Amino acid sequence: METLLSLLHGFTVALEPSKLLFCLIGVFLGTAVGVLPGIGPALTVALLLPVTFKLDPAGSLIMFAGIYYGGMYGGSTTAILLNAPGESASLATALEGSKMAKAGRGGPALATSAIGSFVAGLIATIGLAFLAPWLVEVAVKFGPWDYFALMIVAFVTVSATFGDSPLRGLTSLFIGIALGLIGIDKLTGQARLTFGVPELLNGVEVTTLAVGLFAVGEAFYVASKRSHAPEEIIPIKGSLWMTKEDWKRSWAPWLRGTAFGFPIGALPAGGAEVPTFLSYSTEKRLCKYPDEFGKGAIEGVAGPEAANNASAAGTLVPLLTLGLPTSATAAIMLAGFQQYGLNPGPLLFAEKPDLVWGLIASLFIANVMLVILNLPLIGLWVRLLAIPQPWLYAGIVVFATMGTLAVNGSPVELAMLFIFGFIGYLMRRYDYPVAPMVVGLILGPMAEQQLRRALQISLGDPMILLENPISATLLGIAALALIAPFAMKGLNRFKASED
């Protein structure tokens, strides 16, 4: 009851005209930057920090939260229409969304994305308000060994799910993990695999790899096929809106995606990438039409997008209650809190209840604003596919280049973008999945850090991973997920030989 009263008080703060204006500016900017490949909400919030220094703290933080939510919405637009994810969390959406768009079903893909994001954001924000204390208690009990085991589950499910060959998926994953080793070792401070290039000391940027593999690689691949067998893109086929069948196939993935996104996003080492890929692999296994996956299954858009937005609310749980940022945008938001002399944590709820509950209430308002803003624009966004292919993909390369230079204006970074683009082209050419490579880069350093922490605590004894029930259970799930595809493949061969 106390939480409900606090939330109602938060709405009185968030519904003030000035706060509504801040929220509207935030969601609009977030949607815009989410659409541009490589320019994410973290960069936008960072650029606005100096501008908002003398503004109202509550209004500024509401605007930052709106940018965060808007960026998650906007990142799905180019992921679906152009196979160019604006955010790394939109990678899973691009896999099926881009196939739907090329088949003329970009409208339903964008609609299920927007509505799924709204549903997930609404449920997850309710969870943020009512379940934050309980989830923090669970998260605090997680040890390094448990986080490492969770990463292993994500590695295996991703590499086994994408592509026709689990071995090719694992190959792609290990290349990503190797890229994640580049930079300064956080434990010893030694440079690794930098080859004397100073720009590599900070490691490989996730946005550079993702935009290179997906956007630039896709452009190269389309260009290479143009003179032989040009790919036909159908801008619109049938209704722009979701059919009754689309609704029927989307509602369960929305709920399952939310169930993945919010709890994992709330973990101190969660993030949005793990739940989106887990959601994708789950939908692929549960789908009544498994043959459609890889060709444009709507479940492969609905689930990951719901998980994406639910995790955005989840990341605010450790930020507000522990002062622990679990994403780049959350880290910049933490800097925003500190800019106004505020320290997120349990005391913040007692010292600044108006600000905290006003911020939480504003997330409900931001969700409504985003769905109202995005749904009418579906027809406009889909028209992008009517642009002639050479212009369209040339524009993608230009925006990808501009986004990379905005994040890091280095010639080395630009060279890496096109090297990754060429690698992305080769992987498409020889049918290697690109998603596991990005996942390896994102989660590889996190898994390494948690494993080394676990080994330090156990004085080098690896059995600690099996002695703890949570980590042992997760590793058992990972082992089954790894063996299952090879076992099924062997069983199918045996049946074929008998026939």
Image: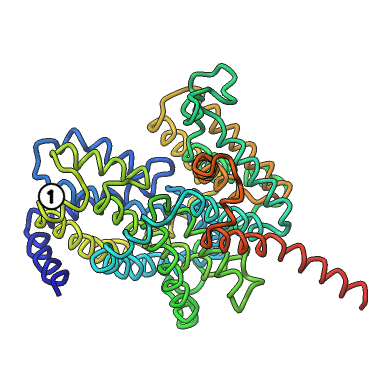
Image check: 75 left or right of 60? Answer: right
As drawn, the residue found furthest toward the top would be: 196
Image check: 397 left or right of 39? Answer: right
Please name the residue that numbered disc 1 is placed on: 59
Image check: 346 left or right of 242? Answer: left
Q: Return the x and y of residue 397 as percentages of the image width and height.
A: 50, 38
Residue depicted at x 56% and y 56% = 154
Viewer-closest of 98 and 226: 98
On screen, residue 5 above or below 276:
below
Residue 386 visible in image: no
Residue depicted at x 31% and y 53% = 318
Viewer-closest of 122 and 234: 122
As drawn, the residue found furthest toward the right would be: 498
User: Which quadrant holds the C terminus?
Assistant: bottom right
Quadrant of the image occupied by residue 123 = bottom left
Q: Return the x and y of residue 410 as percentages of the image width and height.
A: 45, 23
On screen, residue 38 above or below 139:
above
Viewer-closest of 353 and 168: 353
Specify the color scheme. Answer: rainbow
Residue depicted at x 62% and y 42% = 424
Disc 1 crowd rating (10 Å Cα; few below 14, some 14-19, many 20+) is: many
Residue 489 visible in image: yes
Q: Return the x and y of residue 221 as percentages of the image width and height.
A: 64, 45
Quadrant of the image occupied by residue 460 = top right
Label 1 sits on a secondary structure element that is helix
Quadrant of the image occupied by residue 217 = top right
Q: Amino acid at mark 1?
A: Gly
Viewer-closest of 53 and 368: 53
Q: Return the x and y of residue 380 as percentages of the image width and height.
A: 37, 59
